[in-house]
Amino acid sequence: MSDLLDPDLFGQASIAFDLDGTLVDTAPDLVRALNATIQPDGLTPVPVDDLRALVGRGAQALLERAYAQQGRVLSPDATPDLVARFIDIYQADIAAHSRVFPQVETTLARLQRAGATLSVCTNKPSVLSDLLIAEFKLTGYFARIIGPDRTTAKKPAADHVHTALGTGHRRAAMVGDSAPDVDAARAARVPSIVLSYGYSEAPAGSLGADRLLHDFGDIPGALADIWRA
Ligand SMILES: O=C(O)COP(=O)(O)O
Ligand SMILES: [Mg+2]
């Protein structure tokens, strides 16, 4: 495989990436922080394998879903404190056991070298996203890191994808792992790629993305196919 991507194709492209389950395998630290947050409230620990059904719609949804899974209702009054507690615990050791997925860094570097604008479009709060990306020394790859608090409406809303992509590009794409990513891309009228290893509640192949990939390194080839079609 040639390392050089066609600058005519990629040089005018803007590509938005989801974070949890797409760029970084954050499940071990998310589940540790989640369990430390909910156990004092009498809930039983969530196994890491159950996390894929809970992640993808932000920190508050993560907690609400964990409560619902155990037949408990998270009262609106208690929610802000609980979200704050979760964020504190998670932030304190955000990258203890999380890992960047294989091929992410080399692929981002190839896309960047070809002139593509790269961004992050995540439902993870921006303060956590900035920190996590910095911990793994990936900040320099991204023109923008857009959490739900840096746009008018979060994924699956089109606005989130538009804010991440910016303006002035001729080609665009959204790369993610779950329904909010594909639905936001569709709403923004942008092609989507889904990585099968992520945290989708539904089977990744059923989400309706333009391409389903098993390896992050296959993204440039898939984008070239999509954009040349
Ligand atoms: O924090 C979440 O729930 C989801 O984050 P993501 O959008 O990067 O997958
Ligand atoms: Mg995700």
Image: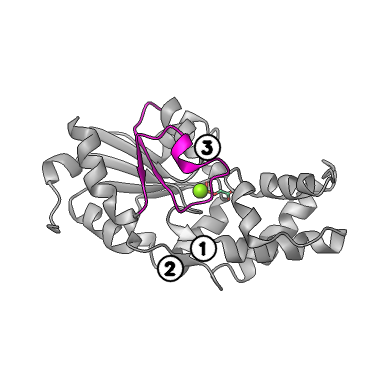
Q: Where is residue 13 in the image (x, y as percent from the top left)?
A: 24, 40
**Numbered range of the magenta stretch:** 188-214
Q: Main secondary structure of the magenta part?
A: loop
Q: Where is residue 220 in the image (x, y as percent from the top left)?
A: 24, 48
**Of discs 2 and 3, which sits in the foreground?**
3
Label 1 sits on what residue type? Leu
Q: Which of 155 and 217 is in front in this view?
A: 217
Based on the picture, tell me whether residue 56 belongs to the magenta stretch. Answer: no
The quarter of the image holding the N terminus is bottom left
**Of discs 2 and 1, which sits in the foreground?**
2
* Residue beneath disc 2: 136
Marks 2/1: CA–CA distance: 9 Å
Label 2 sits on what residue type? Phe
Which sits earlier in the primary sequence, circle 2 or circle 3? 2
Q: Residue at x 17, y 51 (%)?
A: 114
Which sits earlier in the primary sequence, circle 1 or circle 3? 1
Which of the 4 quarters of the picture holds residue 44?
bottom right
Marks 1/3: CA–CA distance: 22 Å
Q: Which residue is drawn at 65% across and 50% down?
A: 59
Q: How crowded is mark 2: few (under 14 residues within 10 Å), some or many (20 or more)?
A: some
Q: Is residue 9 above or below residue 38?
A: above
* Residue beneath disc 3: 180
Judge whether residue 106 can be spotted in this image: yes
Q: Residue at x 72, y 56 (%)?
A: 84
Secondary element under disc 3, as helix, strand or loop, is helix
Based on the picture, tell me whether residue 197 belongs to the magenta stretch. Answer: yes
Q: Label 3 near label 1: C-beta < 8 Å?
A: no
Task: Say whether residue 45 is left or right of residue 42.
Answer: left
Label 3 sits on what residue type? Pro
Say if disc 3 is inside 8 Å of ligand 1: yes
Q: Which of 151 and 73 is in front in this view?
A: 73
* Residue beneath disc 1: 131
